[in-house]
Image: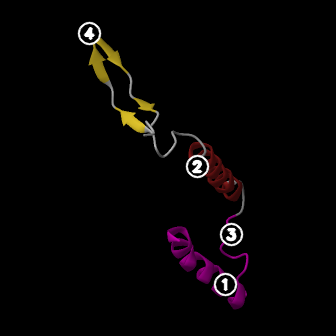
Amino acid sequence: MRVLLFLVPFVVYGGWLVLAGRRRAWVPRGPLPWIIAAAIGAVLVGLAFLGTRGAPPSARYVPPHMENGRIVPGHFDKAETP
């Protein structure tokens, strides 16, 4: 929902440009549009990748701690079901 609210001004501005007949006036020439499109694509792929990984919602996070003089990295413990 927040993403849609964020995109509304851009959609309205794009619609205004189309209706005003200035469709291509604001698009820069050269490699910049392709670089911007590639960056947006990389962000979306990264978000999709990170969004599909992780622990189950019922897991409990155990922060890093020391045991017997050694650092144990943080990890997720499976939730105990009663």
Q: Does the magenta stretch include residue 71?
A: no
Residue that label 3 marks? 27
Which sits earlier in the primary sequence, circle 4 or circle 2? Answer: 2
Secondary structure mostly seen in the magenta stretch = helix
- Name the amino acid type tagged 2: Leu
Give the left or right position of residue 75, taking residue 41 as reference: left
Label 4 vs label 3: CA separation?
60 Å
Give how far across and how far down residue 33 sits, in percent.
68, 59
Residue that label 1 marks? 15
Residue stretch in magenta = 1-28
Closest to the camera, between mark 2 and mark 1, is 2
Which sits earlier in the primary sequence, circle 4 or circle 3? Answer: 3
Which sits earlier in the primary sequence, circle 2 or circle 1? Answer: 1
Residue that label 2 marks? 47
Q: Which mark is residue 69?
A: 4
Which sits earlier in the primary sequence, circle 1 or circle 3? Answer: 1
Residue at the spot 52% in from the left edge and 75% down from the top edge: 5
